[in-house]
Amino acid sequence: MSAGCQGYGGAVEFDRPLRVGLVQECELVHAGLTQMLSEFAGRVTVLPSSTTPAERADVALVDPFTRRTDVDGVAPTTVTRPPGTSRVAVFTWECRDGFVEKAMLGGADGYLSKSLPASELVAAVEKVHAGERIVALDLPTRLDPPTPREIGLTPRESHVVALIAAGAPNKEIARRLGLSMNTVKSHIRTAYRAMGVASRTQAVLWAVEHGVTAPWVAVRDEVAS
């Protein structure tokens, strides 16, 4: 039987349930997730805490914040991909401003809230495995949200927002678009007002939901250089 979902756009089908690995979590969390997703056994299976090489995860769920966030609340800048895992998604309660884009810039293929209902979590995991960048924080969203043009974003503001969604800092946005830092900040302010957001994390969510994204790998590689 094939596994599939309708959760984030068109259906995604696989020839077997996806193997989901929960990395460095306590037994209680592992047991809870296993039970939570048991209803979707035809689509996903949670691997045991100790797995053999043949049981490597298709998607690894990691929470880099529980042990590595320092006392000042600074997010780690890298997300470690377990050996042999094709995709890795952050799976966390942490939704503070700045954490989503740092995780996506630091190597994550998705950013998923631990508050997601089981059906939405399964759909998000399937999309991550299919190669899509997913940010799902279980925040209320509008039905049929407006497009960037409908919301009033100019082409330049759309480019700036796309680069924000890709994790690029303001300095990199200015370099890529040939703008001054003041001009970039001005575009960000006007774009935020048009989108109705107040923070960078909210802007990332808005951009992902509306398909306003820049080439992720290219931006990440250029920022890192």
Image (spheres, rainbow, N blue to C red):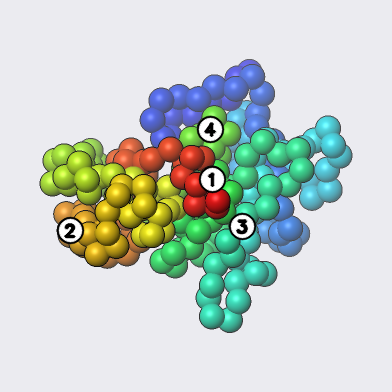
Q: Are marks 4 and 2 in contact (CB under 8 Å)?
A: no
Give amino acid for label 3.
Thr
For the point 50% across and 47% down, which residue is it? 222
In the picture, measured across the screen, residue 198 lies left or right of residue 27, that is left
Comes first in the chain, label 2 or label 1: 2
How dense is the environment of label 1, judged by Cα within 10 Å: few (below 14), some, or many (20 and up)? few
Comes first in the chain, label 3 or label 1: 3
Looking at the rendered structure, the secondary structure element under dot 1 is helix
- Residue 131 image label: 4
Nearer-the-camera pick, 220 or 131: 220
Comes first in the chain, label 4 or label 1: 4
Residue highlighted by disc 3: 78
Looking at the rendered structure, the secondary structure element under dot 2 is helix
Q: Are marks 4 and 1 in contact (CB under 8 Å)?
A: no
- Residue 40 image label: none
Residue highlighted by disc 1: 221
Residue highlighted by disc 2: 190
Comes first in the chain, label 4 or label 2: 4
Would you say residue 52 is visible in this rendering? yes
